[in-house]
Image (cartoon, rainbow, N blue to C red):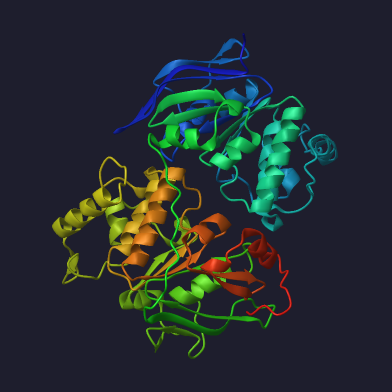
Amino acid sequence: MAYAIELRNITKQFPGVLANDNITLKVEENTVHSILGENGSGKSTLMNVLFGLHKADQGEIYINGQKAVIHNPEDAYRYGVGMVHQHFMLVEQMTALENIILGKEVGNFFIDKEQSYKEVSALVEKYGFQLDLNEKVANLSIGMKQRVEILKTLYRGADTVILDEPSAVLTPQEVLELFDMIRSLKEKGKTIIFITHKLNEIMEVADTITVIRRGKVITSIDKNSTNTEKLANAMVGRDVTIIQSVEQEIQGDVVLEVNALPLLSHTNKTVSFSIRAGEIFGVAGVEGNGQLQLEESIVGLIKSSENQVMFHQQDIGQLNPASRKKLGIGYIPSDRFKRAILPDFSVLENILLGFQDSEPFVKNGVVQEKELYKYSNELIEKFDIRLPNASVPIKTLSGGNQQKVVVARETSRHPKLVVACQPTRGLDVGAIEFIHETLLKLRDEGKAILLISAELTEVMNLSDRIGVMFEGEFQDILTRDAFDQEHIGNLMAGNKKVGESS
C-alpha cells in the first residue's frame, strides 16, 4: 500500500552523536501517528529531515508512494508536508492574519488583504479554530499562537501536519483544546504526526505509536494493542517507577517563613506559610495565579517588605539573588532558557554559573579549570547527563539533559532550601523519574524544598503539604492525609467551601 509518509533507512549523524540510526517509518493517510521518545532520542531530528531542515546522511523519503527530494521547508510544502515547531516562529507585532499569510501573500503589486482574510477565515471556520485574525500575536495566549502556527501550515497546503511537542508550553485546558483541533484535522482528512514524550497524550489522540530510543525504532504499534507501562518501558529500556513521597512527621527547624506577602498587583490578597527542614511544600494552581511572583520573591528577583520573607529567621527581603544563593538557596527556575542557562556557553561554564567567584573553582579572579573539569565530570556522571563532553554548548543538549545540568548545579553545593519551579516541564518520563528521585533524596537529607508546579499529579506525589493557590492567595494548605485530586481541583478553580482555612 502507498503511505502518506514513508521514511526508509534514514540515518543522520552529528559530531559525536548518531541521532537517527537506519530508521524506517510508515505513516498511514488520515491517521494520527505519534512519535514517542525521550528527549534526545532523535524523534525531532527525524521530523526535521522530513521537513527539509536537516539533510539525511542516507535513506529515502516517499510521499503518497512517490519518491520525494526535500532540500528545504519550501520543498516539503510542495509535497504537502508542514511542521509546527515547539518554539513558535511568529512576528509578535503583526496580526494573526499577517503572520499566517507572510511569504504567501495574495496579490500582485499590493497585498489583497480582503482576499487573504476570506481564504484564512474559511480555514478557521472549516476546522473550528475560533481565532481573531485581526488581533496582534503579542496579545494572544500561547494556545492561540499555536493555532496561528497550525493555520500557517494549512494555508500553505499541508496535507500532513507535523506537531513537535505541541503541548509542552500549554496549560491543561489548552491541551484539551489542542486534542480537539487534532481530531478536527483528522476528521477533515489530514494526516497528523505528533511528536511527544508524554504517555497520557499518546493514549488520548494517537492511532499508531512509534517509539524511538537512542536513534533507533524500538516498536511501531496500534494504540489499542499497548498501554502506558509498555510504552514507558520501550522508551527508556527498563521499567519506570512512579516516584511518590511517604507520609512522615516533619520535625525540622523552620527554614523559610513567608508572612503576608502580596503577589498580584490587582488584589490585596497575600500568602503566609513556612517550610521546615526535611519537608517538601508544594504549590498547586492554574498558572497565572501568583506562582511566578512567589518564585521571584523567594529568590530575590522581586524585593519584599520587612519580615515578609525570612530565611533561618533572617529577613532576606531586600537581598539580591546572588546574596541569597550564598546563604544557601538553590534555584531551579520555571523558565530554563531565560533564567537558568546561557545557551551559547559550554556545559562546563553553565555548571560554574552563579558560583563564578567561589572557591575552589576561582582563586584570585582566575578560573581553576582543573578543579572545574573534575567537579563537572563528577556531576555529569552522578546525574547521568548525556553529552559528548563538557565543552559542548549547552544548547546542543536535549531539554532533559539541560535540566539535569541546572538541577546538578543548584543542588550539589549543599543548599538549605531548594526552590524548584516547574522542574519537569517539557521532560520525558525517564528524566522526570530522575528529577523526582533527586527532590525526594534532598528532602530525606534534611533540605527544605518549595515545589511550584502546574502538574497536579507531581505536586501530590512529592509534597508533604500543599498550598492551593488562586488569585494570589492560598485557598487552603493541606496535609498529606487530606490530598484529594477532586477537592484540590475545586480549590484551584476558586471553589472554597465555608469554614476552610487559608
Q: Is residue 185 above or below residue 295?
A: above
Q: Nearer the viewer, residue 123 or 432?
A: 432
Residue found 68% across the figure and 50% down from its top: 174
Q: Residue furthest bottom?
A: 306
Q: Can the viewer see residue 165 in this picture?
A: no
Q: How many marks?
A: 0
Which percent across, then down, holds residue 463?
48, 65
Residue found 38% across the figure and 78% down from its top: 251
Which percent across, then down, holds residue 431?
41, 47
Which percent across, then down, holds residue 482?
58, 68
Q: Is residue 334 above or below residue 241?
A: below
Q: Where's the N terminus, which quadrant? A: top right
Residue 262: quarter of image: bottom right
Which percent across, then down, holds residue 217?
44, 24
Report the side of 458 relative to 288 (left or right). Answer: left
Q: Is residue 5 above or below residue 212?
A: above
Q: Is residue 387 above or below residue 466?
A: above
Report the side of 344 relative to 6 (left or right). Answer: left
Q: Can the viewer see residue 14 in this picture?
A: yes
Q: Nearer the viewer, residue 218 or 89?
A: 218
Q: Nearer the viewer, residue 40 or 36?
A: 36
Residue 249: quarter of image: bottom left
